Each structure stands twice: as structure tokens, then as C-alpha cells.
Image (cartoon, helix red, strand yellow):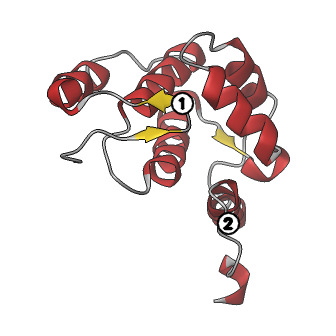
Amino acid sequence: MRNVNISKGNFRFAPITYLNDAVKNIENMPQSNYDEIVEKYVEMNVAHPFREGNGRSMRIWLDLMFKNEIKKVVDWNSIERDDYLLAMERSPIRDTEIKQLLKNALSDEINNSDLFMKGIDASYYYEGYTLYKIQDL
């Protein structure tokens, strides 16, 4: 957990004073259907509990919730980077856009390791990392 206040652009993530309570509240949020899962995901993004790696770890967490609860995963390769980042930026105010974007990218291939690993590559790409790809390792 981070121990400093952080921001990105003009957005300030949850203040350190409230971070522990925010994370506890998020842990207690329901996650039994698609909308609840995405709402929980959006709240965790607002909390941004780590100094580094929030987006990457949260996308894996989102896929695990989808896989366990609704037997779906996100095909991250089918989501354009800029569309995703804009939808996430606006999601604390209105989550409709991110919900639609993710819904259009859902896959039934929950045990496809290639889809999962390509999703890791896409996740790094969203954050601006492009030097290595999983297939190169």
C-alpha cells in the first residue's frame, strides 16, 4: 500500500488518510454480476492503492473476478488504448462508457493462456511500456 498522496494529470487518487478505509469498503462491495464487478473495478481505480502497477494489477484482478463470477474474461487486445484510458478517466463520474467498452470485449475463453498472456502485453502497452512482449521471452 502506498504511503503518499498521488495524482495523475488533474486527478487526485484517494488521499492516504482514507486509503485503508476505501480499500476495506471496496473489498466489501458485491461482485456477483457484470455491473457490480465493473463498479468495484472503478472504485479500486479511484483508490489506486499502490505507488506503481495499479493499472496492470487491477486489469488482472478484473479478469479474475469476471472469470470466477460470470465465466468471462476480457480480450484486452480488442480494446484500443486511448478508448480505454479515456473511459477509465471518466469512469468515476459516469461508468457507462467503461462498462460498454469492457462488455464488447468479453470472451468465453476463460482458460485460454494465450489470450491471458496477450492481455498482459496489452496491459503494459496501455501504460506506455513496449520494449518487450511475452512472446519474445
Distance from the alpha carbon under mark 2 to that under mark 1: 27 Å
Q: What is the number of the mark on residue 121? A: 2
| Nearer to me, 119 or 130 | 130
Q: Which residue is mark 1?
A: 10
Relative to 37, residue 54 above or below: below
Q: Position of residue 67 (x, y in %)?
A: 54, 40
Which is nearer the eye, 82 or 33?
82
Q: Is residue 123 above or below residue 30?
A: below
Q: Tell us which disc is closer to us: 2 or 1.
A: 1
Specify the farthest residue to the front.
Answer: 10
The quadrant holding residue 95 is top right
Q: Is residue 104 left or right of residue 43?
A: right
Residue at screen point 24% across, 18% down: 25
The x and y percentages for residue 28 are: 26, 19
Across and down, in percent, residue 19 comes to: 22, 30
Task: Judge left or right: residue 124 versus residue 43.
Answer: right
Q: Is residue 23 left or right of residue 83?
A: left
- Inspect the image, locate mark 2, and give the three-letter code of the amino acid beneath it: Asp
- Find out whether the residues at labels 2 and 1 contact each other: C-beta distance under 8 Å: no
Q: Residues within 10 Å of mark 1 (few under 14, many from 20)?
A: few
Q: Is residue 121 above or below residue 1?
A: below
Q: Position of residue 7 (x, y in %)?
A: 43, 38
Mark 1 element type: loop
Residue 106 in sight in this render:
no
In terms of secondary structure, where does tag 2 sit?
A: helix
For residue 82, which quarter of the picture?
Answer: top right
Numbered label attached to residue 123 = none
Classify 40 as above or below 66. Answer: above
